[in-house]
Every structure is written in C-alpha cells, then in structure tokens.
Image (cartoon, rainbow, N blue to C red):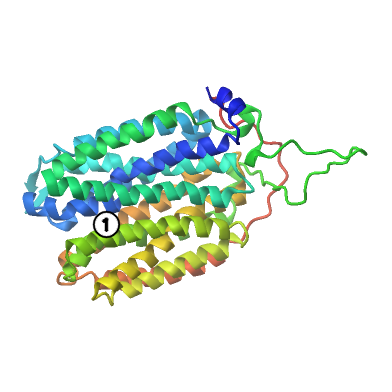
Amino acid sequence: MQQRLANRAPFYYGWIVLGAAGSAMFVRNAAASLTIAVFVYPLSEELGWNRTTISFAAALGGLAATFMSPVVGYLIDRYGARKVLTASVLILGISTLALARATAAFTAFGFVVPWAFWIAYAIGRVIFSSPVQIGASVVVSRWFIRMRGRTNGILNLSHSVGMVLFPLIASVVIAQSGWRDAWLVLGVLVFVAALLPVTLLISERPEVLGLRPDGDEEEPVAEDGIDATPSDAPDEPDWTTRQAVRTPALWLLAIATGLLFLMQAGTNTHSNAFFQDQGLGTVIAGVGISFNAIFLGVGSIVWGRIVEKVPVRFVMASVALVMAAASFLFTTTNTAAEALAYSALFGFGLGGMLTVPPVAYADYYGRRSLGTIRGITEPFTTFGQAVGVMIPGIVFDYISAASYMPFFFAAGSVGILTALIALFATQPDHPRVESMQPVAKCG
C-alpha cells in the first residue's frame, strides 16, 4: 500500500509518514500529565485520594518505561516503527478505557493503595513515555535529514494539538457526566484517530520505497563524471550503537534531556491544581493548560527551524533557560494574566524540549542505529518524568504546608544546571564505517 501511495502521491511520501506518526503523538495525550491534571480534583473529591497517591501512577509508569526503553529501541531497529506504534496504540486505547472502572483499592500502613488505577494508568504512561515518543521521532528522522528540525517540530505540533484537545474534552465530559465517562471517551478517541494511520501508512525509510530523504532527487552527475551534488546536501554521520555509547556527548545529551523532562512532568501534572490553590478558579486553570499546550505547538515550530541553523547544544541550552525562567516566574503568580503568561512561556520552552533532543541524536549519530541509541538514552527521560511527577506532590503534601513554591524554585535551578550541561555536549567526530545497512525489512 505504501509503495502504491508513494508512486501516485503528488508530493513526497515522507509527509504522509509524518502525518501518520503525528496521529500517534496526538493520541498519546490520553496519558499525558496535562490530561491527568484534569482528573486530580474529581478523583480526590470522590475517592478521597491525595495528590501524591494520584501522581504516583504517572511515576510508576515512568519507572517502568525506564526499563522498557532499551527494549523498545531495539524492537524499532529490528522490526520497524510501524509494528511498534501499532501495538502501542492498541495498548494505550485499552488501558485508557480500563481507567473508567479502575477504582479498586486497599489500605496499607495508613496509606490508600489504588492498585487498579495505578496499573491501568501506568501502562498508558509507559506507552506515552517510551514507544510512541521514540518510534514517532525515529521514523520521522529517518525520512528527513535536511528538514529534520522543522519536521520534528511539526510532529510535536500534533502532540500540542492533543495537549489542547484531550484535557478540554475530558473537562467537558467530566462536567457533563463524570470522570468515568471521560476516560471512556478518551479511549475511543485513541482508536479512532491513530490506529489505521500507523498501521497502514508508515514505512520505515525512504529507501524502502525507492526514495531519498527529504524527497531529494538522485545526486546529479556532471558531464565529466564528478559528483555534482549541491553543496547544501546533508552529510550524514553513520554511527553504530557501540561507537555512540563511547562518546561523552551522548550521555551529556541524555542527562540534559532527563532534567528537562523532570521539570516538565512536575509542572504540568500539578499546574491545574496550583492555579486553583492560588485562587484563580477552574476556568483560569483550564485556560492555563490550554495556553501551555498552544505555545508548545508554537515553540515546536520555532525551535525546529532554529535548530536547523544553530548548533544544537546552544539551542538546547536556550530551551533550558526559557523553562528555568518560567519556573521562577510561577512563584510570583497572583493574577490570571500572570498565570496565562507564565504558562505560555513554559509551553514555548516545552516545544523545544520535545523537538531539539531527537534532532540532536539523529544529527550527531545518523540513522543506522537511531532506534537503539534512543532506547539506550530514553531511560534518562522516563526516569526524569517519573521523579518529576512525584516531587511536587510530596512537597505539597508533606514538606511545604500545602505549597508548590519550593518545587518551582528548585525547578528553575535545575534548568540553569541543564543549560550548562548542554553546552558541553559538542558533536563528536565520527569514524569511517561501512555504508548504512537496511534498518528494518518491514515496509
């Protein structure tokens, strides 16, 4: 099917692959931190669970994804992103539907243990954090080299759209018929929006369909037989996994990315409750989430274009500083205007957080072993998310007398540290290796 469409499409088939991968990024928001943020209040009020108890489900999923990511990366290189993404969408939809009935709990040592909710949400969170995030960005980075920054930006724009719509849909359904029906609606949306696109339209690499990255034509050859490839054609590095793991840059990028996601997970999961604690009401809290998501989309496009022109380590450091500034500013939130402005700034930084690291890994190490390399480094991201989502709840419930302020100060400091780490992640000189072998036999 892919070959037929590639032959008949009036444009480069990579854009269709991008759209299909984007559908998976869109629906992964069923398990996003901004989505569960909408459920924190109703779950707390009806079931009596505190915020640490609820956020632990996301932390559990993040920890599980930490161990799953290397396996996921290997599976993408071995069997292809299409199969991984198809299975991921199926599992995500089922786990989301299950959350409508996942209320079974018991009490141990004075703590409520909502084991059914933790298991169901953690499964979805694993899908959110690992196979969808890795698989979608890897397949897009294999189809585009010269336009890798902007296409990863567009990919994350689809995630941004989901960040707006999933919490909004959940909020409306919760208001009309309760949180159980909201989970059911989100689960159905996962199947409807993504299952067919990822199953039918994704192909692993352009070479499989007789195409070239970015839709470029074959290299022109001058009359004297000398290669006349344009001077701006991409000179792609070609690393094996074993070679890549020996470079300090890989681990510096991984650490910096993990710290960014630590900041993101904590802030996004608790932002809705934080704004309501500040007396701004449910409407402003919901609009703040929307501003975060909308400007994440804007940031994805802007940072994507910037990273095509500016060395990636400088762009990544800039992203960290933007997120740090927003974190510090959250401590001054007293009005609706401030809440919306700071949410927009933080969302703009998140657009870079999602777009720049995948481009960095692909630009530094090439397409050959990109799935495995991403799988090895992704545990830093998932662990950062798991820890980040728990810290604000612990600070609020047990440390700071019902206040998130110490967390925001700490997050801002982490952002400054991250910027410094990113600056040291210089691109390594790659050795000469044999030409790239086919990544996956599936089409």
In the image, 224 versus 58, the foreground residue is 224
Residue at 38% across, 40% down: 68
Q: Quadrant of the C terminus?
A: top right
Mark 1 element type: helix
Say whether residue 92 is visible. no
Q: Residue at x 40, y 48 (%)?
A: 159
Q: Residue at image x 16%, y 70%? A: 279
Give the crowd class for mark 1: few <14, some 14-19, many >=20 residues within 10 Å: many
Rendered residue at 30%/70% (across/down) = 408
In the shown orientation, is residue 160 left or right of residue 398?
right
Horizontal and vertical percent for residue 440? 56, 29
Judge whether 45 appears above or below 271 on screen: above
Residue 343, image x and y in percent?
A: 33, 65
Q: Is residue 353 left or right of residue 50?
A: right
Nearer-the-camera pick, 18 or 248: 18
Amino acid type at mark 1: Thr
Which residue is most to the right?
224
Q: Is residue 295 left or right of residue 96?
A: right
Q: Position of residue 435 (x, y in %)?
A: 71, 36
The answer to whether 380 appears left or right of 407 in the picture is: right
**Could one spot residue 78 in this view of the protein?**
yes
Question: Residue 102: percent from the left, percent from the top?
Answer: 15, 39
Count of numbered circles in the view? 1
Q: Nearer the viewer, residue 107 or 348?
A: 348
Residue named by callout 1: 269
